[in-house]
Image: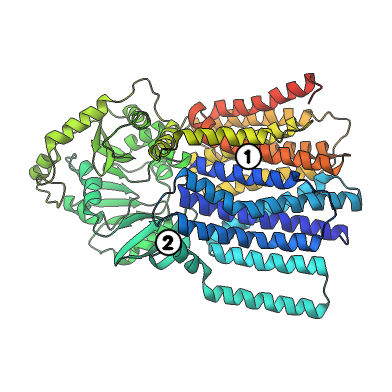
Amino acid sequence: MNSSRDIRSLLFITGFVSSSLQFIMLREVVCLCGGNEFITGLFLAIWLIFSSLGATLPGGRKIINEKHLFLFFAATPIISLALFIFFTRIMIHPGETPSLVKTIALIMISLAPTAVMSSRAFIFLSSAGKKLRQSEPGNSFGLETAGSVIAGILSTTIVILFIRTFLYFIIIEIASFLAFYLILYKPGNIVRIILTVVSIAALMLTIKWAPDFRIRELQLGNINISETFDTPYGNITTGTYYGEEVTFYDFRPLYYNNDNIRCEEDIHFGLLQTEKTDSVLLISGGLFNHLPEIMKYKPEQLVYIEHDPGLLKTEDIYGRLSDSVNVTLLSKDAYSYLKKGGKKFNAITELVPQPYTLSLNRYYSREYFGIIKSNLAEGGVFVCNPLPSFNYVSGYYKKALSSVVYALKSSFRNVKVIPGNSLYVIASDDSIRTDFCRLSEEKGISNLYVNCNYFNDNEISRRSNLLMSELDSSLSPNTLLKPVASWYENSLFIEKQGNKNLALALLILFIAFSLLKIKRGTLLMYSSSCALSGLAVTVIFIFQAIFGNAHLLSALILSLLFSGLATGAAMNRNRLRSFIFYPLALAVTILSTGILANTMMLQAAGSVIAGSLMLLTFAAGFFAGSLYRIMTSDRSALSTEKVYGADLSGSASGYLLTGTILIPLMGLTISTFILSGIILVSVFIVSVSSKL
């Protein structure tokens, strides 16, 4: 390595390139494989475990050809993407949510090349920097993390707002190859100019090739794609499937033409209950496929809320609406809109996806249902569909349904469940009827499906009463602070695939494997990283629960955390201060975050509280980064490998545990106490035991 400036540049680029791929692949995997926290935790855990392996593999300190190392590292994102596209095509059918086994296989195969090589590149640079400048490895960690911060911001904001996903990916690859070559080979001015011109030409050809369309066509197989783009909430792809127009949201059909059964049930199960239909609110689900059914009731005003503006664009609602139809279109978060109040509706129909994520869980919480009640006129009706409709009802199905029904009963006097195309739950303070055949005749509503030709009122009432009798009264209602519905929904999904025991075994296996990375003296680093990554999941969940499915805000939280890590790792420390001070400070910060979050969730979230939460996030990262610097100061490069490996392994455990188990089952506040307790137990062990 020629100079310390080269090392600093390579460290920053290494962090930037690896994290850019990580953010892009995380988004792709989450969209493709279901989008819940368990998938996110698996992705991050597998990435970090592979990175930990790369950091601690034998030979990490040997002298190697750095030119070959970094040029191969620059190529690994292309290898990872190619593997991801290839195995997506051969393993997953269009519209299918892959099984847990397929998901894990896809993640492991795709991530292995880049995750292993990025950590080996970091260890090489950290060792080289220490030999060349006698600098502490914390500086290297800080520079690499700074690259990750910039990658997180750009990968989230630029991709969503300006550039398509895979075009951005190829731009990063072209730029990284150019940067690595210029730094490692130091060519003359003429060669630099030639390389720059060739890179620009390659970029122009890439733009003309339109890689996003080509890659989506490969992934979706026999779908003839007409448009594809990313939004802050997911991927939207429209096209034709055997001549039928279909809109895919995160690779699964969202709605398609002539879906009369689902659309009629969505609308008529609720509107048939009401005496007045002057004002109707429809939340998500598509407007034009439901509009003909709604207009049968001749509402004076229809409000349609769709949180993702990309879906409004796909439907071309503004261009297709007739002037005679009084429809108010809102592209915003329904929770925030209803919380402000101001309007009363005769009927509210909610068609957001089922609560299989912590973010979606908020639309099925006790707090949200209380807000729904305040926005309904006297005798108003609310309808949602929290579960699919099965002939067989398992234990997790009953628990998921019970948690939602009891949350509704906290606000409404009457609640009924109706098994149809999905499982619908109807809530009102007035009586609720299940004789939809008779209701449609009484009100003169002519339907193709919800009528006496297809519906048997007695059978519907029997099945509805049977489901209500199966509710578990011992379960607590689903809430913002304790989102049990998401846990039951995910457990149901895994159980339906026959992978219940496999999921538990994998969870234990990943955590056990990460524990193997704890070496002498690295327990505090492991526990601190575990708690820190758990804190990141917690804070992201808090902001999503309050402000909506805010991917941009999530990127801000992670950037704050990484910024704190980089700052703490790069700053000089007082050598006289005990290194135990920093994990204790981190534990106190996490406890403070839990207490503040509890206050934030139970009352109106002001800017002061939100800002304080962000400041605590930065502080937590700062204390963890400071611990890393102290534990790698004045020690050998091997010690750096051990500490870095423990840091990665601990982060893997924290990501995997917090979003999938701790928050859903224990609640938000108790989760922060558990995370802090992990640190405190480690401090106690280190303080009293000479074996660690």
Report helix, strand or loop for mark 1: helix
Give the Cα distance between marks 2 and 1.
31 Å
Report helix, strand or loop for mark 2: helix
Residue at the spot of label 2: 220
Residue sitting at x 53%, y 37%: 542
**Which mark, by number, is residue 592?**
none
Q: Are marks 2 and 1 in contact (CB under 8 Å)?
A: no
Residue sitting at x 16%, y 49%: 449
In the figure, is residue 133 to the left or right of 325? right
Q: Quadrant of residue 486?
A: top left
Residue 543 image point, x, y percent: 53, 41
Considering the image in quadrants, where does the C terminus appear?
A: top right
Residue 37 image point, x, y percent: 51, 41
In the figure, is residue 534 to the left or right of 345? right
Question: Can residue 7 be seen in this snapshot?
Answer: yes
Q: Is residue 623 above or below residue 260?
A: above
Residue 396 image point, x, y percent: 38, 31
Q: Nearer the viewer, residue 356 or 646?
A: 646
**Which mark, by number, is residue 652?**
1
Q: Is residue 603 above or below residue 74?
A: above
Residue 635 image point, x, y percent: 87, 39
Sort mark 2 into few (<14), some (14-19) or many (20+) by Cα contacts within 10 Å.
Answer: many
Q: Earlier in the sequence, mark 2 or mark 1?
A: 2
Q: Nearer the viewer, residue 443 or 130?
A: 130
Q: Nearer the viewer, residue 269 or 205?
A: 205
Give, as a three-letter code, the residue at label 2. Leu
Residue sitting at x 47%, y 68%: 213
